[in-house]
Amino acid sequence: MIAEAGLIDWISCVLDTCIDWVRFMRKLLNVSAMPERKGTEHLSAKMAVSQLNSTVYPNRQLLHAGDTTNSTPMKHASIGFSLIELLVVIAIAAILAGLAVPSFQGMIASSNLTSTTNDLIATLARAKSDAIRRGKRVTVCMSADGASCATTGDWTQGWILFNDDVHPSGAAAVESTNDITAITAGLSNGLVVKGNQPYFSYSADGQAKLMNGGSGGGTLRVCSPSSALTNDTRARDIKINWVGRVTLEKPTGVAATCPAPV
């Protein structure tokens, strides 16, 4: 959202700059088109009367110096923009926006990537902290409904954090919805999150464990299929080792299909 707001502000600034440029060019053309002044007193008098009339009686018919009858009203200059000037502004703004939009798309994709990665890391850190504080198991699993652990699909569908006091020996499972302490809904920002584990569970000593007590380390990959990012910048790997430590890596050569980590 911040990057999108920045794009809108930038386009607004471009339009303002183009309008100022058109105003400057109009003034420049008006100055260059003015007739040379003649040094005769008669012409100076006519100009003085004309200026006085336009100032004191802007909406009345004007009298020229030496005239005893009303002349035709002086036409007031337009203060708006002509169609050509408006088209020039739009054309310049479109060209500049076309040059800047790709870089803004990359900025937005990178921002979403960082935000989602940080959310996952924060959830895992909280799970480990809660497990040590409680002295009991705490599990993070992928979830499509925010109430139960999913065994199919990937982490893009969302995930939940729950107190896992009575953990089975097989897949992760929620005993009661009252045990759920945090819910993250499915992603809607175009990112893909895949992992080589359907859940990550922390024991009372802060180690990552499987439900059967084995080592529960693994990797979660947050990936953007956006064409604005390269294969070397589109993914982040969150690695959890057997002691529960979380590290972040930036893999290279990740295709736009966003394959799961090995």
Image: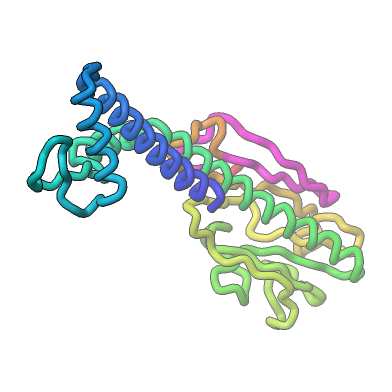
For residue 97, which quarter of the picture? Answer: top left
Q: Quadrant of residue 163?
A: bottom right
Does residue 101 show up? no
Residue displayed at 24% across by 38% down: 49
Where's the C terminus, which quadrant? top right
Q: In this view, does 164 lie to the left or right of 60?
A: right
Q: Is residue 109 left or right of residue 220?
A: left
User: Residue 44's spot in the image, x, y percent?
Assistant: 25, 26
Q: Nearer the viewer, residue 17 or 210?
A: 17
Q: Residue at position x 74%, y 73% from top?
A: 181
Q: Based on the displayed image, in which of its 4 quarters is residue 131 positioned?
A: bottom right
Image coordinates of residue 47 in percent, x first then y, are 24, 32
Q: Can residue 192 be seen in this view?
A: yes
Instruction: State the residue in front, 116 or 40.
Output: 40
State whether residue 197 is above or below residue 145. above
Asked whether, in this view, residue 45 is left or right of residue 251, the answer is left
Image point (62%, 70%), residue name: 149
Magenta stretch, residue numbers: 235-258
- Residue at the location (47% across, 34% down)? 103
Coloured how? Answer: rainbow
Magenta-drawn stretch contains 75: no
Instruction: Out of 115 and 142, give the one closest to the viewer.
Output: 115
Q: How many marks?
A: 0
Q: Where is residue 105 in the image (x, y as percent from the top left)?
A: 46, 41
